[in-house]
Structure formats: structure tokens, C-alpha cells
Amino acid sequence: AQKVTQAQTEISVVEKEDVTLDCVYETRDTTYYLFWYKQPPSGELVFLIRRNSFDEQNEISGRYSWNFQKSTSSFNFTITASQVVDSAVYFCALSRISSGSARQLTFGSGTQLTVLP
Amino acid sequence: EPEVTQTPSHQVTQMGQEVILRCVPISNHLYFYWYRQILGQKVEFLVSFYNNEISEKSEIFDDQFSVERPDGSNFTLKIRSTKLEDSAMYFCASGVGGSSYEQYFGPGTRLTVT
């Protein structure tokens, strides 16, 4: 069975602070994908990043960066110089790598990030 | 940029009634999904659909639920006899398939069962 844990239910920071959202996962698969999605107050789910389990290079995209550590089963997400528009619920998710069609996402419970002006 | 669309945005129905939630996935995508999110909770997988058949379904997706791709563009979720606990946001998602595992979500349909 797969499981994703986001222990931080709510985080509040002041604009321009850096913030890290934690994600820990469990899976018996040796290869898998990890994802982050953003859910702003409007409710839609916005894809942010996909990471392969066999690629542990960290990734940076503008103010966003992701730290994947297979040894600790963690895939943490850092927002640098946070902005009010970053306020949203952020979900970490996991998918097995399947040659077939079993590609459903297992989501964590989400972290509500509030960035105060 | 192509996107997944869903209608209606909000559906209110009485317990025991049938509802059909509609989705138009991105046109060249081959994998289709339904997820639900009860207010304030995590997003939960319901069902995946590929090659005109269900490929995976969760425990939530019982006999009250069904999916259909009636034509080349629409993908529907039917709940035969709604219960109060079916109240949730229902998200449709689609993916290209192949080596791409990204799923792109629609804006959701909020279902309220009274």
C-alpha cells in the first residue's frame, strides 16, 4: 500500500520569508513518481512538479525548489521569498510506475500555507 | 493552453437522486480519472479509465458509481442514488500516458446532497 504524510497541517509566514513544506511517503515499489500540486482558494488543483524515484537531483524552478531524499523517503518543497499569492493548500502525491494503466495518485492530506503581507 | 473542463461547477441534489457529473478531458489525452475531496480533507482516487474501460477503482467506487465515455470528448461520472456522504468536490483529471505520468485536473464540481 502507498501512503503520503504531510505532517504540517497549517503554516503561516510573513511575506518574503522562506518556507519548507514537508512530505514523507511510504511505498513498497522500488520505482515511483512523486508530485506536488497547489490548490489555491479558487479550488482547482494545479500541477507543480513530477519527480522520478531514480533521479535524486534537486530541482529549482524560480522561487520553488524540491529536495528529494530517497534514504529518508522525503520530498520536501521550499518556496523562497514567499508572496501572498503563494497562499494555498499544497498537496504531495505518489504514483507507482506502471507499464499498464494503474497510475492513480495517492495524495497526502495537504498543508495550508498562509503568507501574510 | 488546453485544459480539462467540468460541468456543472455546483450541483445540489436530494438524497436518493441520480446525478451525472461531466468532464471534457484534454483532447489528446488517453487516461482519465475521477477523484473526490470531502471538504477540508485529502483528495481521494475513485477510478481510472483507459482504452474505454475501467483500469483501476478504489473501495469508494462501489456499485452506486459508474463512468462512461459516451463519445470522443466527454467523460462522465454517474452516482445512481446519492447519499449525504457523497457531498464533496469531484475532480476529473486526464493524462497523456506513455512515459508522462502528469495528471491535469479540471476545476471540480461541488456536489451537495441534501
Image (spheres, coloured by chain):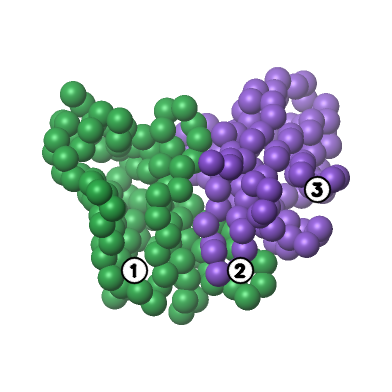
Chain colours: A green, B purple
- Count of numbered tags: 3
Q: Secondary structure at mark 1?
A: loop
Q: Position of residue B73 (x, y in %)?
A: 76, 44
Q: Position of residue B67 (x, y in %)?
A: 79, 47
Please report, as a chain letter, where disc 1 is located. Answer: A
Q: Nearer the viewer, residue A98 or A72?
A: A98
Question: Along the horizontal axis of the image, is B70 left or right of B110?
Answer: right
Q: Secondary structure at mark 2?
A: loop
Q: Nearer the viewer, residue A67 or B62?
A: A67
Does residue B80 sit above or below A35 in this rendering?
A: above
Q: Residue at x 74, y 35 (%)?
A: B22
Q: Earlier in the sequence, mark 2 or mark 3?
A: 3
Residue B72: assigned label: 3
Q: Which amino acid type corresponds to the residue marked 2 in the rendered image?
A: Gly
Please report, as a chain letter, where disc 2 is located. Answer: B
Q: Position of residue A10 (x, y in %)?
A: 30, 37
Q: Residue at x 32, y 61 (%)?
A: A75
Graded by Cα atoms within 10 Å as few (under 14), some (14 to 19) or many (20 or more), the crowding at tag 2 reads few
Q: Nearer the viewer, mark 2 or mark 1?
A: 2
Q: Which amino acid type corresponds to the residue marked 1 in the rendered image?
A: Ser
Q: Which amino acid type corresponds to the residue marked 3 in the rendered image?
A: Gly
Question: Do the numbered discs 1 and 3 sit on residues whose CB atoms are within 8 Å?
Answer: no
Residues beneath discs 2 and 3 located on the same chain = yes
Question: Do the numbered discs 2 and 3 sit on residues whose CB atoms are within 8 Å?
Answer: no
- Check disc 2 and report the residue beneath it: B98
Q: Residue at x 46, y 66 (%)?
A: A33
Q: Position of residue A84 (x, y in %)?
A: 25, 29
Graded by Cα atoms within 10 Å as few (under 14), some (14 to 19) or many (20 or more), the crowding at tag 3 reads few
- Check disc 1 and report the residue beneath it: A73
Query: CA–CA distance between discs 1 and 3?
Result: 40 Å
